[in-house]
Amino acid sequence: MEISIIITFYDNINILKTCLDNLLETIVSEQHKIEIIIVNDNPRKNLLAIQEVYGKRISLFIINMEKNSGYSSACNCGVQAANYDHILLMDCDIFPSGVWLEEMICTYRNINSYGCVSATIIDMGTNKMFGYGFGIYGVDTIHYLQNRSLDYCPKEDMDFPILSSGCMLMTKSLYFKLGMQNPIYLNAFNDFDLTYLNYLQGNKNRMSCKAFVFHRGHVAGNVRTNYYADSKAVFFQKLGGKIDHLALETLNRIYASQNPLKNCRVIVVNFSNSLKRQDYIDNFITLNNLHIQQLYDFKNPSGNKIILSDFMTWNICRLDLPILYFSDDYLLLKENYHWYINRANKNDLIIDRHGNIIHIDELLKEHLDFSK
């Protein structure tokens, strides 16, 4: 296969070097013809040294934008310059690993070499998933299985209405057919918009479960975040709740695969700040035929970790009913060893809006039990 890898760059040359070094270490197959196009979206940065060093090892071209025009425009410029019809969009802070490219190509062939395929992106600091595909519900962005360990990574490729372009394979011709990336999304939601348009065309957006790449994140500074809220508003205005049902269907598929509690009475404690927080609870309760005995509705406006004993009395801890703790991120509820070890019922679950289900036994296994 002939592939043009397009890397957008704004800041941190050392990160870019690490990306390129990892690329050269992992592109080992002679079956593929590869070129790398770096789009420098920062006129203050000189990448001549990158060209001199890496251009000797692989076909590499650098395009210097006349001014900082944003991620969408940089991607469009790179795609227009690509010599091959297969393009692979890659952020400069993505570090490929193992046989990632072969796995992406395998997944791509499984969708008849048409549509979009994303690698599974791993946070390089925590070695946990950045997210396995994306959903939109109300005004919430769902990163399915975000922050779960790789043990819980799906064992199958899955389709979604939205993917990330952090490391994504498609054809140049399809990219043009979709109208390229809309420059109005300067540095956010551009890839969501592009892949959603692909979904509307009836094409696949597929996650490749065995193609692992690592993600550094937060290397470009405020230039990536200054216009985030505006871009989000434009994108959500465009969607208008059109794919809410798809988000819930995907959540239910993930929830069901993790075999949570079913057909029993439960206590529900809701710490989510989402405007749709009750919808997530109702969906989970209905899916598993649960009956709410008591409901405690709190919020966590600080966004900090949640200490359960700050909110609930000890007699609740000693009740012999399973408790469902719901939050926007399960990690916020992780540090409650004293509460969990003293629970009268050991079937508690932590769930979040990203599809994560954590049994408290998982958390207790991380600690030495002093109660014995």
Image (tube, grey):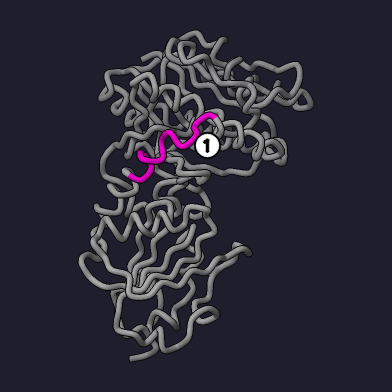
In this view of the protein, which residue sits in the foreground, 133 or 221? 133
Q: Which residues are magenta?
A: 238-248
Residue 45 picture location, percent across and down? 75, 27
Residue 107, horizontal then vertical, whole percent = 30, 28
The image quarter containing residue 224 is top right
Q: Is residue 143 above or below residue 350?
A: above
Mark yes or no: residue 365 visible. no
Q: Quadrant of the N terminus?
A: top left
**Is 181 drawn above or below residue 26 in the view shown?**
above
Q: Can residue 237 be seen from the camera position used here?
A: yes
Residue at the image point whose x is 37% and y is 52% from the top: 355
How far across and how far down the image is residue 222, in percent? Answer: 72, 40
Say what secondary structure mark 1 lies in. Answer: strand
Residue 137 sits in which quadrant?
top left
Q: Residue at x 48, y 69 (%)?
A: 297
- Side (left or right) of 314 relative to 358: right
Q: Is residue 365 magenta?
A: no
- Give x and y (percent) for residue 288: 25, 60
Residue 157 appears left or right of 22:
left
Q: Amino acid at mark 1?
A: Ile
Inspect the magenta stretch and tell me whether residue 244 lies in it. yes
Q: Residue at x 43, y 40 (%)?
A: 134
